[in-house]
Amino acid sequence: MSCISHHRASAIASSAKRYPIRWLASLAALAALAGVLVLATRPQATTLEAYSPLVGKPAPQIAGASLTGPPIDLAQMRGRFVLVNFFASWCVPCLDEQPQLVKLASGNQAPGTFAGVHDHRPPPPPPVSIIGVAFDDPASAALGFLRSTGATWPAIADPSGKIALHYGVRGPPETFVVAPDGVVVAHIDGPVAARTLRAIIARAAADGA
Amino acid sequence: MRWGGAAGASKRRFPPWLPPWLSWALLVAIIIAALTTGAVTTTSSHPTAQARAAAIDSQIRCPSCEALSVAQSNASTAVTIRRLVLQRVERHQTAAEIEDYLVSKYGTWILLRPSTTGLTGLVWFIPIAALALLVSIVIVFFFRRSRTPARAVLLAGVRAPSETTPSSLETTPSSLETTPSSLAPTASSLAPTASSLAPAPANARNMPGLEDRAGLEDRADPPAQRAAPTPRTVRQRHKRFLISAGVLAAAAVTVGLLMTTSSPRLPGQSITGSLSLGRAQRASRQLVQARTLVAGGHAVEALKLYTKILKSQPHNASALAESGWLEYEAGSEAGNAALMRTGEANVEEAVHSNPGASEAHLLLAYLLVNKGETAQAAAQLRLFLADHPSRQLVSAEHSTIIEVFRAVGQQPPAS
């Protein structure tokens, strides 16, 4: 048995010596095939969900005076899902996104909080809050933008750009989903639909976040 | 042209009294000098915090503009990162610590220099491996040539058939005996056939053609039967050894320099330092450095740099406008009307010297807004927008532009 395998091995070795180009080409083709298989069998990315090193880590702190009312403190919002939405009045995709966020927040129990979808399916969806962060936008312009779109959730100005930097934001709109335990569970790059957000939150809640 | 051609090289050499190895030695010396000069001019033993911060900035990608480093961009995210870098440098954090922090927020994407680990590490490994392979090929090429003098002997035999050829042909099999003597040199091509039919005779070693072919099959000839190296062959071996050593040394220096100069450089600085920067290139590099200084809040140093640029290029619109704006701001803060006027004059001169400089129009517009001349500011903003400025710049100034046009009851031009 071992003699046969040894014979085969030596036959392969001599073939490789005789036709090195063919062997190299075959190896390259195999490597390319393996690469295609790896790429093709990766799990499909959820719409707009983008990589962020923050996912799975505690959300950076957001605290300060709100543009719309009482001061904001992300640390005080543990126990519910929080959407940290970066927006700007000059950002056209943000204009498209705002109605979706308003739709999501339409079941608000308190300003900035809503109970989610009442679709008669147990268990009830987890409570969600929204915090807006004005990205590279003067407070007055940001406030005007929020009012014009019917947003009622608290928002904070970020004149120094520090909050955006701590969240690794490249350009609005970007949204981070923060779980009840204060850990970032998703990052969405670009305008997001209410339905997508619901799906992400439901998935995170099911995962026990 | 054959490398190291034995016969023709000395005839072609000009002037003839120069030693044959001089051109190679010069080539190696020039390569080493060019690389080391750049490395020496770029290193500084005690860089300032601003210089260190600028060097780090040049290695970090602008989050909103991607193709630029934060040192090259005036986008708000780039300005924020520049501030953060300078603050951390002043707190004596290392470049690696600052980069790690930014990577923890943005991912490795934020670094312009690819990572040396994981799959990205191939980007670094492949060029070094290719260089090593190239050097190995060159060395093997030279040494194989120097170790196979038989080929040179064969070629010499082809050019001038030696007297031994006819006699040696007598030892070949009978089928070859009919070969005309005029075809004697081509007998070597038939030799493998002959040798495969019957063992090569012992005195076939004396035939130049047969010796060469037989040498391919049996390299382990007794030393006594090999052609004794002539002084010329020895000299050529030495020359080739020296050339190989030179190439190897140059490759080692290149790799060494790549390792040492892979540390962050100042914005706009090339790997070979400032050997061939023209006036315009130097000015544009200094502009980037001055903007970095402004973003870091170092207006005085920035003004010095702008003055330097204006000495070499008195009508540089960007330097005039930006330095004018700095002077105006400084004058405004210190209540120095003369300085404010100087700054204003510089910004106006920038607009006049280059009407296509969009940034100068923008700065003049701001200046006019401060003076309460909103209508003229709106006119300057129209000129600014007509110059097709970058989208980033327009986005950053969007709210002010809208406010100015609203104040004068006009609609901003559609862009």
Image: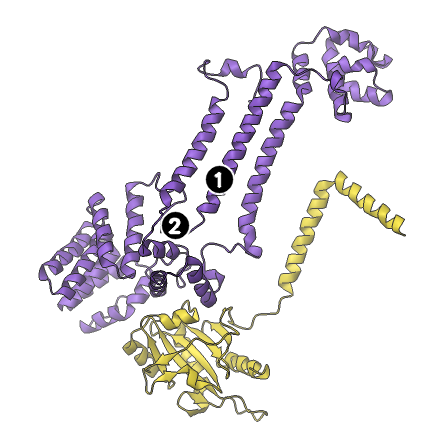
**Quarter occupied by the C terminus of chain A:** bottom right
Q: Amino acid at mark 1?
A: Thr
Task: Indicate left or right for B244 with B58 as reference.
Answer: right
Q: What residue lies at 42% left-to-right and 82% top-to-bottom?
A: A74
Q: Quadrant of residue B80?
A: bottom left
Q: Amino acid at mark 2?
A: Arg
Measuring from the top left, give residue B166's x and y in whole percent.
77, 7
Residue wearing tag 2: B265
Chain B display color:
purple
Measuring from the top left, give residue A180's x and y in whole percent.
50, 84
Query: Considering only vertical position in the picture, is B20 above or below B271?
Result: above
Q: Nearer the viewer, residue B134 or A116?
A: B134
Residue wearing tag 1: B254
Q: Quadrant of residue B244?
A: top right
Chain A display color:
yellow
Whichever of callouts 1 and 2 sits on the residue coming sooner in the sequence is 1
Q: Secondary structure at mark 1?
A: helix
Q: Residues within 10 Å of mark 2 (few under 14, many from 20)?
A: many
Q: Chain of mark 1?
A: B
Measuring from the top left, give residue B86's x and y in whole percent.
34, 61
Q: Nearer the viewer, residue A196 or A96?
A: A196
Measuring from the top left, give residue A76's x and y in whole percent.
42, 86
Q: Is residue B260 visible?
A: yes
Q: What residue lies at 21% left-to-right and 61% top-to-bottom?
A: B363
